[in-house]
Image: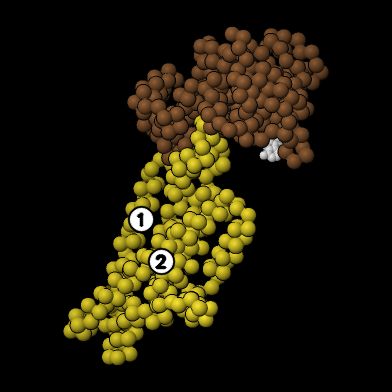
Amino acid sequence: MDEVILSVKNLVKRFDDNTILNGISFDVRRGEVIVVLGPSGCGKSTLLRCLNALEPIQGGEIFLNGQAVDSAAKDLTGLRQQIGMVFQSYELFPHMSVLNNILIAPVQVQKRQREEVRAEALQLLERVGLREKQNSFPRELSGGQKQRVAIVRALCMHPEVLLLDEITAALDPEMVREVLDVVLNLAREGKTMLIVTHELSFARAIADRVLFIDGGKIVEQGKPADFFDHPQTERAKQFLRTFEYESVK
Amino acid sequence: MNWEFISKYLPLYEKAAWLTLKLGLLGIVLATLVGLLCAAVRYYRIPVLEGIVRIYIEISRNTPLLIQLFFIYYGLPKIGIRTDPASCGVAGLAFLGGSYMAEAFRSGLESVDPIQSETAYALGMSRSQALRFIILPQAAAVSVPAYMANVIFLLKETSVFSAVSLMDLMFTAKDLIGLYYKTTESLAMLVGFYLIILLPVSALGNVLERRLRYAGFGA
Ligand SMILES: Nc1ncnc2c1ncn2[C@@H]1O[C@H](COP(=O)(O)OP(=O)(O)OP(=O)(O)O)[C@@H](O)[C@H]1O
Ligand SMILES: [Mg+2]
Protein backbone atom coordinates (compact mmCIF):
# COMPACT_ATOMS: atom_id res chain seq x y z
CA MET A 1 0.00 0.00 0.00
CA ASP A 2 3.04 2.23 0.11
CA GLU A 3 3.83 2.57 -3.55
CA VAL A 4 3.64 6.20 -4.65
CA ILE A 5 1.57 6.51 -7.83
CA LEU A 6 1.34 10.24 -8.22
CA SER A 7 3.91 12.66 -6.98
CA VAL A 8 3.54 16.43 -7.09
CA LYS A 9 6.62 18.51 -6.34
CA ASN A 10 6.54 22.24 -5.85
CA LEU A 11 3.81 22.80 -8.41
CA VAL A 12 3.39 26.40 -9.53
CA LYS A 13 0.47 27.45 -11.70
CA ARG A 14 -0.10 30.99 -12.96
CA PHE A 15 -2.67 32.55 -15.24
CA ASP A 16 -0.73 35.48 -16.67
CA ASP A 17 0.73 37.04 -13.54
CA ASN A 18 -2.00 35.74 -11.27
CA THR A 19 -0.41 32.94 -9.25
CA ILE A 20 -3.03 30.34 -8.37
CA LEU A 21 -0.91 27.48 -7.04
CA ASN A 22 2.35 28.45 -5.43
CA GLY A 23 4.46 25.46 -4.50
CA ILE A 24 2.15 22.51 -3.92
CA SER A 25 3.77 19.20 -2.98
CA PHE A 26 2.17 15.90 -2.06
CA ASP A 27 2.26 12.20 -2.89
CA VAL A 28 -0.61 9.87 -3.63
CA ARG A 29 -0.05 6.23 -2.71
CA ARG A 30 -1.77 3.27 -4.31
CA GLY A 31 -5.18 2.74 -2.79
CA GLU A 32 -5.21 6.08 -1.07
CA VAL A 33 -8.19 8.42 -1.14
CA ILE A 34 -7.28 12.08 -0.82
CA VAL A 35 -9.86 14.80 -0.45
CA VAL A 36 -8.88 18.31 -1.47
CA LEU A 37 -10.68 21.08 0.37
CA GLY A 38 -10.42 24.83 0.17
CA PRO A 39 -12.42 27.99 -0.38
CA SER A 40 -13.98 28.67 -3.75
CA GLY A 41 -11.45 29.94 -6.24
CA CYS A 42 -8.41 28.63 -4.37
CA GLY A 43 -7.40 26.49 -7.33
CA LYS A 44 -8.75 23.01 -6.62
CA SER A 45 -10.08 22.48 -10.14
CA THR A 46 -6.93 24.01 -11.53
CA LEU A 47 -4.84 21.54 -9.53
CA LEU A 48 -6.75 18.55 -10.94
CA ARG A 49 -6.48 19.95 -14.46
CA CYS A 50 -2.71 20.30 -14.05
CA LEU A 51 -2.48 16.67 -12.95
CA ASN A 52 -3.59 15.42 -16.34
CA ALA A 53 -1.95 18.21 -18.27
CA LEU A 54 -5.10 20.00 -19.34
CA GLU A 55 -3.31 23.07 -17.99
CA PRO A 56 0.37 23.80 -18.60
CA ILE A 57 2.31 24.41 -15.38
CA GLN A 58 4.81 27.18 -14.72
CA GLY A 59 6.95 25.45 -12.13
CA GLY A 60 7.58 22.20 -10.30
CA GLU A 61 7.02 18.65 -11.45
CA ILE A 62 4.32 16.00 -11.57
CA PHE A 63 5.20 12.33 -11.81
CA LEU A 64 2.82 9.49 -12.56
CA ASN A 65 4.50 6.17 -11.86
CA GLY A 66 7.80 7.95 -12.31
CA GLN A 67 6.90 9.48 -15.70
CA ALA A 68 6.81 13.26 -15.92
CA VAL A 69 3.38 14.70 -16.69
CA ASP A 70 3.31 17.99 -18.54
CA SER A 71 1.58 19.29 -21.62
CA ALA A 72 4.78 18.69 -23.62
CA ALA A 73 5.20 15.07 -22.47
CA LYS A 74 6.05 12.69 -25.29
CA ASP A 75 3.41 10.13 -24.44
CA LEU A 76 0.76 12.53 -23.20
CA THR A 77 -2.16 10.43 -24.40
CA GLY A 78 -0.64 7.34 -22.81
CA LEU A 79 -0.25 9.18 -19.51
CA ARG A 80 -3.78 10.52 -19.61
CA GLN A 81 -5.19 7.06 -20.08
CA GLN A 82 -3.82 6.25 -16.64
CA ILE A 83 -5.56 9.24 -15.06
CA GLY A 84 -9.34 9.16 -15.04
CA MET A 85 -11.19 12.42 -14.65
CA VAL A 86 -14.83 13.18 -13.91
CA PHE A 87 -16.06 16.75 -14.24
CA GLN A 88 -18.72 18.60 -12.33
CA SER A 89 -20.83 18.95 -15.48
CA TYR A 90 -20.55 15.22 -16.44
CA GLU A 91 -19.61 16.05 -20.03
CA LEU A 92 -21.13 12.98 -21.59
CA PHE A 93 -20.92 13.07 -25.38
CA PRO A 94 -24.46 14.09 -26.37
CA HIS A 95 -24.37 12.44 -29.79
CA MET A 96 -23.61 8.97 -28.41
CA SER A 97 -25.62 6.44 -26.45
CA VAL A 98 -24.62 5.64 -22.90
CA LEU A 99 -22.84 2.50 -24.05
CA ASN A 100 -20.95 4.28 -26.83
CA ASN A 101 -19.92 7.03 -24.44
CA ILE A 102 -18.25 4.33 -22.37
CA LEU A 103 -16.83 2.28 -25.25
CA ILE A 104 -15.39 4.98 -27.47
CA ALA A 105 -12.11 5.53 -25.62
CA PRO A 106 -11.26 1.91 -24.68
CA VAL A 107 -12.00 0.80 -28.25
CA GLN A 108 -10.52 3.71 -30.21
CA VAL A 109 -7.71 4.76 -27.89
CA GLN A 110 -6.68 1.55 -26.17
CA LYS A 111 -7.62 -0.62 -29.17
CA ARG A 112 -9.33 -3.18 -26.98
CA GLN A 113 -11.86 -5.63 -28.34
CA ARG A 114 -15.30 -4.05 -28.47
CA GLU A 115 -17.03 -7.17 -27.13
CA GLU A 116 -14.69 -7.46 -24.19
CA VAL A 117 -15.14 -3.80 -23.22
CA ARG A 118 -18.87 -4.05 -23.75
CA ALA A 119 -19.14 -6.90 -21.29
CA GLU A 120 -17.15 -4.93 -18.75
CA ALA A 121 -19.15 -1.76 -19.37
CA LEU A 122 -22.45 -3.59 -18.86
CA GLN A 123 -21.18 -5.09 -15.65
CA LEU A 124 -20.15 -1.67 -14.35
CA LEU A 125 -23.45 -0.14 -15.46
CA GLU A 126 -25.22 -2.92 -13.60
CA ARG A 127 -23.32 -2.04 -10.47
CA VAL A 128 -24.33 1.61 -10.63
CA GLY A 129 -27.90 0.58 -11.41
CA LEU A 130 -28.00 1.77 -15.01
CA ARG A 131 -27.74 -1.36 -17.11
CA GLU A 132 -31.16 -0.79 -18.65
CA LYS A 133 -30.06 2.70 -19.74
CA GLN A 134 -27.27 1.40 -21.97
CA ASN A 135 -29.02 2.50 -25.16
CA SER A 136 -30.36 5.80 -23.85
CA PHE A 137 -28.92 9.11 -24.90
CA PRO A 138 -27.51 11.52 -22.31
CA ARG A 139 -30.43 13.96 -22.68
CA GLU A 140 -32.75 11.18 -21.50
CA LEU A 141 -30.93 10.79 -18.17
CA SER A 142 -31.16 12.69 -14.91
CA GLY A 143 -28.09 14.53 -13.62
CA GLY A 144 -27.31 11.80 -11.13
CA GLN A 145 -27.61 9.13 -13.81
CA LYS A 146 -25.35 11.10 -16.15
CA GLN A 147 -22.75 11.46 -13.47
CA ARG A 148 -22.79 7.72 -12.74
CA VAL A 149 -22.28 7.05 -16.44
CA ALA A 150 -19.37 9.50 -16.46
CA ILE A 151 -17.80 7.57 -13.59
CA VAL A 152 -18.23 4.26 -15.39
CA ARG A 153 -16.74 5.81 -18.53
CA ALA A 154 -13.64 6.83 -16.59
CA LEU A 155 -13.39 3.44 -14.85
CA CYS A 156 -13.55 1.49 -18.08
CA MET A 157 -10.15 2.92 -19.03
CA HIS A 158 -8.66 1.19 -15.96
CA PRO A 159 -6.94 4.33 -14.71
CA GLU A 160 -4.30 4.19 -12.00
CA VAL A 161 -5.89 7.14 -10.28
CA LEU A 162 -9.27 8.81 -10.53
CA LEU A 163 -9.70 12.59 -10.25
CA LEU A 164 -13.18 13.73 -9.24
CA ASP A 165 -13.93 17.45 -9.37
CA GLU A 166 -17.05 18.40 -7.39
CA ILE A 167 -18.98 15.67 -9.12
CA THR A 168 -22.14 16.34 -7.11
CA ALA A 169 -22.07 20.13 -7.16
CA ALA A 170 -24.48 20.40 -10.09
CA LEU A 171 -26.92 17.80 -8.76
CA ASP A 172 -30.22 18.15 -6.98
CA PRO A 173 -29.81 17.12 -3.34
CA GLU A 174 -31.75 13.87 -3.73
CA MET A 175 -29.35 12.69 -6.44
CA VAL A 176 -26.18 13.43 -4.53
CA ARG A 177 -26.44 10.27 -2.50
CA GLU A 178 -26.69 7.85 -5.42
CA VAL A 179 -23.49 9.26 -6.91
CA LEU A 180 -21.55 9.42 -3.66
CA ASP A 181 -22.50 5.82 -2.86
CA VAL A 182 -20.82 4.75 -6.08
CA VAL A 183 -17.67 6.60 -5.06
CA LEU A 184 -17.75 5.13 -1.57
CA ASN A 185 -17.88 1.66 -3.10
CA LEU A 186 -14.88 2.45 -5.25
CA ALA A 187 -12.99 3.50 -2.15
CA ARG A 188 -13.89 0.23 -0.46
CA GLU A 189 -12.41 -1.64 -3.40
CA GLY A 190 -9.18 0.25 -3.01
CA LYS A 191 -9.35 2.64 -5.96
CA THR A 192 -6.84 5.45 -5.76
CA MET A 193 -8.70 8.74 -5.86
CA LEU A 194 -8.19 12.45 -5.56
CA ILE A 195 -11.50 14.07 -4.75
CA VAL A 196 -12.56 17.70 -4.67
CA THR A 197 -15.85 18.08 -2.85
CA HIS A 198 -17.90 20.39 -0.70
CA GLU A 199 -19.76 17.48 0.91
CA LEU A 200 -17.97 17.51 4.23
CA SER A 201 -19.53 14.44 5.81
CA PHE A 202 -18.76 12.49 2.66
CA ALA A 203 -15.19 13.82 2.73
CA ARG A 204 -14.83 12.73 6.30
CA ALA A 205 -16.16 9.25 5.56
CA ILE A 206 -14.08 8.57 2.51
CA ALA A 207 -10.76 10.35 2.98
CA ASP A 208 -7.55 8.73 4.11
CA ARG A 209 -6.05 12.17 4.07
CA VAL A 210 -7.37 15.70 3.66
CA LEU A 211 -5.42 18.45 1.92
CA PHE A 212 -6.58 21.96 2.73
CA ILE A 213 -5.49 24.52 0.16
CA ASP A 214 -5.65 28.26 0.55
CA GLY A 215 -3.63 31.09 -0.93
CA GLY A 216 -1.94 28.76 -3.39
CA LYS A 217 -0.41 26.53 -0.70
CA ILE A 218 -1.32 23.43 1.24
CA VAL A 219 -2.12 25.11 4.53
CA GLU A 220 -2.96 21.99 6.46
CA GLN A 221 -3.18 18.27 5.86
CA GLY A 222 -3.93 15.20 7.88
CA LYS A 223 -6.35 12.48 8.79
CA PRO A 224 -9.97 13.56 8.40
CA ALA A 225 -10.77 13.11 12.09
CA ASP A 226 -7.90 15.40 13.04
CA PHE A 227 -8.65 17.95 10.36
CA PHE A 228 -12.36 18.22 11.00
CA ASP A 229 -12.30 17.99 14.79
CA HIS A 230 -9.04 19.74 15.59
CA PRO A 231 -8.03 22.03 12.77
CA GLN A 232 -4.67 23.53 13.56
CA THR A 233 -4.66 26.68 11.48
CA GLU A 234 -6.89 29.72 11.75
CA ARG A 235 -7.69 29.52 8.03
CA ALA A 236 -8.88 25.93 8.24
CA LYS A 237 -11.04 26.78 11.25
CA GLN A 238 -12.52 29.71 9.37
CA PHE A 239 -13.17 27.52 6.31
CA LEU A 240 -14.94 24.86 8.37
CA ARG A 241 -17.04 27.53 10.08
CA THR A 242 -18.47 28.61 6.73
CA PHE A 243 -20.31 25.28 6.62
CA GLU A 244 -22.01 25.80 9.94
CA TYR A 245 -25.26 27.60 10.63
CA GLU A 246 -26.24 29.04 13.94
CA SER A 247 -29.76 28.97 15.17
CA VAL A 248 -31.60 32.23 14.63
CA LYS A 249 -34.53 31.39 16.89
CA MET B 1 -50.04 28.87 -73.15
CA ASN B 2 -48.52 27.59 -76.37
CA TRP B 3 -47.85 23.89 -75.67
CA GLU B 4 -46.29 23.34 -79.04
CA PHE B 5 -43.68 25.97 -78.29
CA ILE B 6 -43.05 24.42 -74.91
CA SER B 7 -42.57 20.89 -76.19
CA LYS B 8 -40.34 22.18 -78.96
CA TYR B 9 -37.94 23.98 -76.67
CA LEU B 10 -38.17 21.67 -73.67
CA PRO B 11 -35.04 19.75 -74.71
CA LEU B 12 -33.13 23.01 -74.94
CA TYR B 13 -34.14 23.86 -71.38
CA GLU B 14 -33.31 20.37 -70.26
CA LYS B 15 -29.79 20.74 -71.60
CA ALA B 16 -29.46 24.11 -69.94
CA ALA B 17 -30.79 22.69 -66.69
CA TRP B 18 -28.16 19.96 -66.70
CA LEU B 19 -25.47 22.58 -67.29
CA THR B 20 -26.83 24.76 -64.47
CA LEU B 21 -27.02 21.77 -62.14
CA LYS B 22 -23.58 20.47 -63.07
CA LEU B 23 -21.82 23.80 -62.63
CA GLY B 24 -23.89 24.57 -59.54
CA LEU B 25 -22.96 21.32 -57.83
CA LEU B 26 -19.31 21.66 -58.81
CA GLY B 27 -19.31 25.17 -57.39
CA ILE B 28 -20.94 23.95 -54.20
CA VAL B 29 -18.38 21.16 -53.77
CA LEU B 30 -15.56 23.68 -54.16
CA ALA B 31 -17.31 26.18 -51.90
CA THR B 32 -17.58 23.42 -49.29
CA LEU B 33 -13.85 22.75 -49.49
CA VAL B 34 -13.02 26.46 -49.30
CA GLY B 35 -15.43 26.75 -46.38
CA LEU B 36 -13.87 23.82 -44.49
CA LEU B 37 -10.42 25.27 -44.98
CA CYS B 38 -11.43 28.76 -43.84
CA ALA B 39 -13.39 27.42 -40.88
CA ALA B 40 -10.37 25.36 -39.77
CA VAL B 41 -8.09 28.39 -40.08
CA ARG B 42 -10.42 30.47 -37.94
CA TYR B 43 -11.19 27.71 -35.43
CA TYR B 44 -7.52 26.98 -34.78
CA ARG B 45 -6.65 30.70 -34.94
CA ILE B 46 -3.79 30.14 -37.35
CA PRO B 47 -1.83 33.41 -37.45
CA VAL B 48 -1.59 35.42 -40.71
CA LEU B 49 -3.94 33.04 -42.52
CA GLU B 50 -6.67 34.03 -40.09
CA GLY B 51 -6.36 37.67 -41.20
CA ILE B 52 -6.43 36.73 -44.86
CA VAL B 53 -9.50 34.55 -44.35
CA ARG B 54 -11.29 37.34 -42.53
CA ILE B 55 -10.67 39.78 -45.39
CA TYR B 56 -11.75 37.18 -47.94
CA ILE B 57 -14.97 36.51 -46.04
CA GLU B 58 -15.83 40.21 -45.84
CA ILE B 59 -15.21 40.77 -49.56
CA SER B 60 -17.00 37.62 -50.59
CA ARG B 61 -20.08 38.25 -48.48
CA ASN B 62 -20.41 41.93 -49.24
CA THR B 63 -20.17 41.96 -53.02
CA PRO B 64 -22.74 40.60 -55.48
CA LEU B 65 -21.95 37.42 -57.38
CA LEU B 66 -22.48 39.25 -60.65
CA ILE B 67 -19.60 41.59 -59.88
CA GLN B 68 -17.42 38.71 -58.68
CA LEU B 69 -18.09 36.95 -61.96
CA PHE B 70 -17.17 40.05 -63.97
CA PHE B 71 -13.90 40.31 -62.09
CA ILE B 72 -13.09 36.69 -62.83
CA TYR B 73 -14.29 36.79 -66.43
CA TYR B 74 -12.90 40.14 -67.55
CA GLY B 75 -10.29 40.81 -64.88
CA LEU B 76 -8.28 37.63 -64.71
CA PRO B 77 -7.36 37.60 -68.44
CA LYS B 78 -5.84 41.08 -67.91
CA ILE B 79 -3.28 39.52 -65.58
CA GLY B 80 -2.70 36.65 -67.95
CA ILE B 81 -5.06 34.01 -66.57
CA ARG B 82 -7.24 32.60 -69.30
CA THR B 83 -10.76 31.66 -68.38
CA ASP B 84 -13.76 30.09 -70.06
CA PRO B 85 -17.35 30.79 -69.04
CA ALA B 86 -17.90 27.43 -67.34
CA SER B 87 -14.88 27.57 -65.05
CA CYS B 88 -15.70 31.23 -64.38
CA GLY B 89 -19.15 30.31 -63.16
CA VAL B 90 -17.79 27.53 -60.95
CA ALA B 91 -15.02 29.72 -59.58
CA GLY B 92 -17.46 32.55 -58.88
CA LEU B 93 -19.78 30.22 -57.00
CA ALA B 94 -16.87 28.80 -55.02
CA PHE B 95 -15.65 32.32 -54.18
CA LEU B 96 -19.08 33.47 -53.06
CA GLY B 97 -20.11 30.22 -51.39
CA GLY B 98 -16.80 29.60 -49.62
CA SER B 99 -17.42 32.38 -47.14
CA TYR B 100 -20.99 31.35 -46.43
CA MET B 101 -19.91 27.75 -45.94
CA ALA B 102 -17.03 28.87 -43.71
CA GLU B 103 -19.46 30.69 -41.44
CA ALA B 104 -21.81 27.70 -41.34
CA PHE B 105 -18.99 25.34 -40.35
CA ARG B 106 -17.46 27.78 -37.90
CA SER B 107 -20.70 28.31 -36.03
CA GLY B 108 -21.00 24.52 -35.81
CA LEU B 109 -17.48 24.11 -34.46
CA GLU B 110 -17.92 26.91 -31.97
CA SER B 111 -21.18 25.50 -30.71
CA VAL B 112 -19.24 22.58 -29.21
CA ASP B 113 -18.14 23.53 -25.71
CA PRO B 114 -14.32 23.32 -25.33
CA ILE B 115 -14.80 21.14 -22.26
CA GLN B 116 -16.05 18.41 -24.61
CA SER B 117 -12.61 18.24 -26.21
CA GLU B 118 -10.97 18.38 -22.80
CA THR B 119 -13.08 15.41 -21.75
CA ALA B 120 -11.90 13.59 -24.85
CA TYR B 121 -8.26 14.44 -24.06
CA ALA B 122 -8.77 13.32 -20.47
CA LEU B 123 -9.86 9.95 -21.88
CA GLY B 124 -6.53 9.74 -23.70
CA MET B 125 -7.72 10.81 -27.13
CA SER B 126 -5.33 12.61 -29.45
CA ARG B 127 -6.34 15.91 -31.02
CA SER B 128 -7.36 14.20 -34.24
CA GLN B 129 -9.37 11.53 -32.42
CA ALA B 130 -11.16 14.18 -30.38
CA LEU B 131 -11.91 16.07 -33.58
CA ARG B 132 -13.16 13.02 -35.43
CA PHE B 133 -15.21 11.29 -32.75
CA ILE B 134 -16.34 14.14 -30.54
CA ILE B 135 -16.17 17.60 -32.11
CA LEU B 136 -16.99 17.07 -35.79
CA PRO B 137 -20.13 14.94 -35.31
CA GLN B 138 -21.60 17.54 -32.95
CA ALA B 139 -20.48 20.46 -35.10
CA ALA B 140 -21.87 18.85 -38.25
CA ALA B 141 -25.29 18.44 -36.71
CA VAL B 142 -25.37 22.13 -35.87
CA SER B 143 -24.04 23.15 -39.29
CA VAL B 144 -26.42 21.14 -41.44
CA PRO B 145 -29.39 23.56 -41.53
CA ALA B 146 -27.13 26.49 -42.45
CA TYR B 147 -25.26 24.32 -44.93
CA MET B 148 -28.43 23.25 -46.71
CA ALA B 149 -29.68 26.86 -46.78
CA ASN B 150 -26.38 27.81 -48.43
CA VAL B 151 -26.72 25.04 -51.00
CA ILE B 152 -30.14 26.34 -51.99
CA PHE B 153 -28.89 29.93 -52.00
CA LEU B 154 -25.97 29.01 -54.27
CA LEU B 155 -28.14 27.01 -56.67
CA LYS B 156 -30.38 30.05 -57.01
CA GLU B 157 -27.37 32.29 -57.58
CA THR B 158 -26.52 30.24 -60.69
CA SER B 159 -29.15 32.38 -62.42
CA VAL B 160 -26.53 35.10 -62.97
CA PHE B 161 -24.27 32.73 -64.92
CA SER B 162 -25.79 33.97 -68.17
CA ALA B 163 -23.92 37.23 -67.59
CA VAL B 164 -20.68 35.52 -68.60
CA SER B 165 -22.46 34.01 -71.61
CA LEU B 166 -23.00 30.56 -70.18
CA MET B 167 -25.88 28.78 -71.89
CA ASP B 168 -27.66 28.11 -68.65
CA LEU B 169 -31.39 28.23 -67.86
CA MET B 170 -31.54 31.99 -67.56
CA PHE B 171 -29.62 32.45 -70.79
CA THR B 172 -31.98 30.09 -72.61
CA ALA B 173 -35.06 31.89 -71.33
CA LYS B 174 -33.72 35.33 -72.25
CA ASP B 175 -32.69 34.02 -75.63
CA LEU B 176 -36.12 32.59 -76.42
CA ILE B 177 -37.92 35.69 -75.19
CA GLY B 178 -35.69 37.83 -77.39
CA LEU B 179 -36.21 35.63 -80.44
CA TYR B 180 -39.89 34.71 -80.24
CA TYR B 181 -41.50 37.02 -77.67
CA LYS B 182 -43.05 33.95 -76.00
CA THR B 183 -42.52 35.48 -72.58
CA THR B 184 -45.07 33.44 -70.62
CA GLU B 185 -43.96 30.05 -71.92
CA SER B 186 -40.25 30.87 -71.62
CA LEU B 187 -40.55 32.13 -68.07
CA ALA B 188 -42.84 29.26 -67.05
CA MET B 189 -40.25 26.76 -68.21
CA LEU B 190 -37.49 28.72 -66.45
CA VAL B 191 -39.36 28.69 -63.16
CA GLY B 192 -40.38 25.07 -63.67
CA PHE B 193 -36.83 23.86 -64.12
CA TYR B 194 -35.49 25.80 -61.15
CA LEU B 195 -38.24 24.26 -59.04
CA ILE B 196 -37.38 20.80 -60.34
CA ILE B 197 -33.79 21.36 -59.27
CA LEU B 198 -34.47 23.04 -55.93
CA LEU B 199 -37.50 21.27 -54.48
CA PRO B 200 -35.69 17.93 -53.98
CA VAL B 201 -32.76 19.75 -52.36
CA SER B 202 -35.16 21.51 -50.02
CA ALA B 203 -36.85 18.22 -49.18
CA LEU B 204 -33.48 16.60 -48.48
CA GLY B 205 -32.62 19.49 -46.18
CA ASN B 206 -35.84 19.01 -44.24
CA VAL B 207 -35.26 15.29 -43.87
CA LEU B 208 -31.69 15.82 -42.65
CA GLU B 209 -32.79 18.42 -40.16
CA ARG B 210 -35.49 16.19 -38.76
CA ARG B 211 -33.10 13.25 -38.54
CA LEU B 212 -30.61 15.31 -36.61
CA ARG B 213 -33.24 16.55 -34.23
CA TYR B 214 -34.08 12.98 -33.33
CA ALA B 215 -30.47 11.89 -33.11
CA GLY B 216 -30.42 12.39 -29.36
CA PHE B 217 -28.88 15.80 -28.99
CA GLY B 218 -29.18 18.57 -26.51
CA ALA B 219 -27.43 17.09 -23.46
N1 LIG C 1 -8.47 29.72 -17.79
C1 LIG C 1 -8.30 30.61 -16.78
N2 LIG C 1 -7.78 31.83 -17.03
C2 LIG C 1 -7.59 32.72 -16.01
N3 LIG C 1 -7.89 32.47 -14.74
C3 LIG C 1 -8.41 31.29 -14.41
C4 LIG C 1 -8.64 30.29 -15.42
N4 LIG C 1 -9.17 29.20 -14.82
C5 LIG C 1 -9.26 29.51 -13.51
N5 LIG C 1 -8.80 30.75 -13.25
C6 LIG C 1 -8.73 31.39 -11.93
O1 LIG C 1 -8.00 30.54 -11.08
C7 LIG C 1 -8.56 30.56 -9.79
C8 LIG C 1 -8.81 29.14 -9.32
O2 LIG C 1 -9.88 28.61 -10.06
P1 LIG C 1 -10.40 27.14 -9.79
O3 LIG C 1 -11.52 26.91 -10.71
O4 LIG C 1 -9.27 26.19 -9.83
O5 LIG C 1 -10.92 27.27 -8.29
P2 LIG C 1 -11.66 26.19 -7.42
O6 LIG C 1 -10.87 26.04 -6.18
O7 LIG C 1 -11.92 24.96 -8.20
O8 LIG C 1 -13.03 26.94 -7.08
P3 LIG C 1 -14.49 26.33 -6.89
O9 LIG C 1 -14.54 25.73 -5.52
O10 LIG C 1 -15.39 27.51 -7.01
O11 LIG C 1 -14.70 25.32 -7.96
C9 LIG C 1 -9.80 31.42 -9.84
O12 LIG C 1 -9.47 32.68 -9.28
C10 LIG C 1 -10.09 31.55 -11.30
O13 LIG C 1 -10.61 32.81 -11.57
MG1 LIG D 1 -13.64 24.04 -9.03
Asked if B35 appears above or below B181 in the picture, the reply is above
Mark 2: secondary structure: helix
Taking A149 as reference, is A118 left or right?
left
Q: Nearer the viewer, mark 2 or mark 1?
A: 2
Query: Mark 2–mark 1 contact, CB under 8 Å?
Result: no
Measuring from the top left, give residue B90's x and y in whole percent.
41, 70
Residue denoted by label 1: B206
Write the residue at 53% across / 78% down: B79
How dense is the environment of label 2, judged by Cα within 10 Å: few (below 14), some, or many (20 and up)?
Answer: many
Colour given to chain B in the rendered image: yellow
Under mark 2, the amino acid is Gly
Chain to which the residue tagged by mark 1 belongs: B
Q: Quadrant of the C terminus of chain A?
A: top right
| Residue that mark 2 sits on | B27
Query: Which is nearer the eye, B6 or B92?
Result: B92
In the image, residue A1 above or below residue A240: above
